[in-house]
Amino acid sequence: MLEKSRKKLIMLIDGGKPAYCKIVTEELKPLLSYASKKAPDVIVCTHYDSDHIGGLIPVVKHYGNNIGEVWMFKSLPLKIAKTKKIAVHNDPLLGSFDDVTMKDDFSTALSEQELSFYNTLITSIKQQKELETLVKSLKIKLLEPFEGKCKLSGWPEVKIIAPALGYYKKLFPKGFTEELIKNEITALEAASTKAQLTKKAKDPFAELDKVSKEISSINMASVILLLTIKKRKYLFTGDAGVASFENIKNHKKVLKDIYWLKVPHHASARNLNAALIKLMKPRYAVISGKKYISKLVVDCLSAVTKNIVSTATTKKTITVYHTTR
């Protein structure tokens, strides 16, 4: 929540998994009561991995058309082959996906692990379409959060700084094709594999730069949102990667000396490099989740700040208050 003079702005950025809806709405309840609002002014979906978008579907259903605006990318076409339409593995969860067409041998050629990632990807794509349809049915204002867009009247402190429309189009030139889906599966598989360090690295920055920075296009397209309050920068990053940050206009100036950083992709070693951490040099670094946490990233952050908080250790919601005193 942002507050100035008599104005209050409540933003919700991502919603976690579907099961998190109750947690999210309970956390918002006292804020909404304090601000005399029935729902958040803005709901932002940084990208549509299930652990970010899944919880937003029941949250939007909960608040309905009391929500002011929703910022999310519209669903992309999924085109694998011009063949007959089929159900996705006849899965009771995924069901039949109307615009899914695929070669008969595509899914059968995948290994058991690849098939798991494939199902995760298709679920995410379906959730994106479901959320978009829901928002439109409730006649809530829907805006695509490209760089420089989604400006809030009276709140110049809030800016979308990535992705730029051109960069987004490079990531998804023709929607979801068979080639892109294969690349997404490869990226998901790689991200699930963590390098195990047997001892503390002498130079964690050098070791971090040795890690591949390849991540999925979905993560690369994450919305990066910057709040600037009294010259203090608060950066919300979704699951953005190194290229996502480097494609920000004047990124070395914009990302210099961040006051509060939501560490991208749960502190995965694939999403940050030494140069970015040294540039951002956050005063506070917040890590959400625990699945992808890299000791290298934590050690690098520890070299620039003593204020690192993780939901994996606190097991509680992290609340940050900004004071201008």
Image (tube, grey):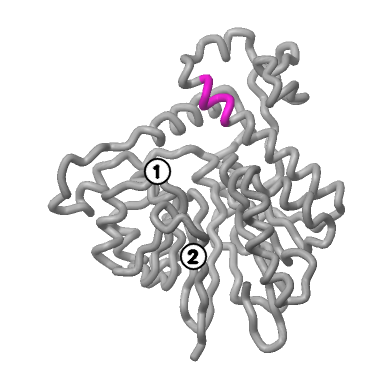
Position of residue 216 in the picture relative to residue 294 (left or right): right
Return the residue at label 1: 292
Residue at the extreme bottom of the image, as rendered: 325
- Rendered residue at 68%/63% (across/down): 150
- Rendered residue at 72%/76% (across/down): 35
Position of residue 30 in the picture relative to residue 243 (left or right): right
Measured as percent of width and height from the top left, residue 29 is found at: 70, 66
Query: Is 171 drawn above or below residue 161 in the view shown?
Result: above
Q: Chief secondary structure of the magenta span?
A: helix
- Rendered residue at 26%/48% (across/down): 208
Which numbered tag is attached to residue 64? none
Tell me, yes or no, whether the two marked residues, 2 and 1, touch with CB atoms within 8 Å: no
Return the residue at label 2: 235
Front residue of 192 and 71: 192
Query: Is 93 drawn above or below residue 86 in the view shown?
Result: below
The amino acid on which the numbered mark 2 sits, given as a three-letter code, is Leu
Give the number of the mark in front: 2 or 1. Answer: 1
Measured as percent of width and height from the top left, residue 141 is found at: 80, 58
Q: Is residue 212 magenta?
A: no
Q: Secondary structure at mark 1?
A: loop
Front residue of 2 and 218: 2
Q: Work out how far the residue at label 2 is from the one at label 1, CA to CA, in angstroms.
A: 20 Å
Measured as percent of width and height from the top left, residue 302 is found at: 27, 62
Measured as percent of width and height from the top left, residue 171 is found at: 54, 40
Query: Is 82 drawn above or below residue 17 in the view shown?
Result: above
- Binning the other alpha carbons within 10 Å of mark 2 as few (below 14), some (14 to 19) or many (20 upward) gives many
The amino acid on which the numbered mark 1 sits, given as a three-letter code, is Tyr
Front residue of 130 and 85: 130
Marked residue nearer the N-terminal end (2 or 1) = 2
The region drawn magenta spans 115-120
Residue at the extreme left of the image, as rendered: 202
Q: Secondary structure at mark 2?
A: strand
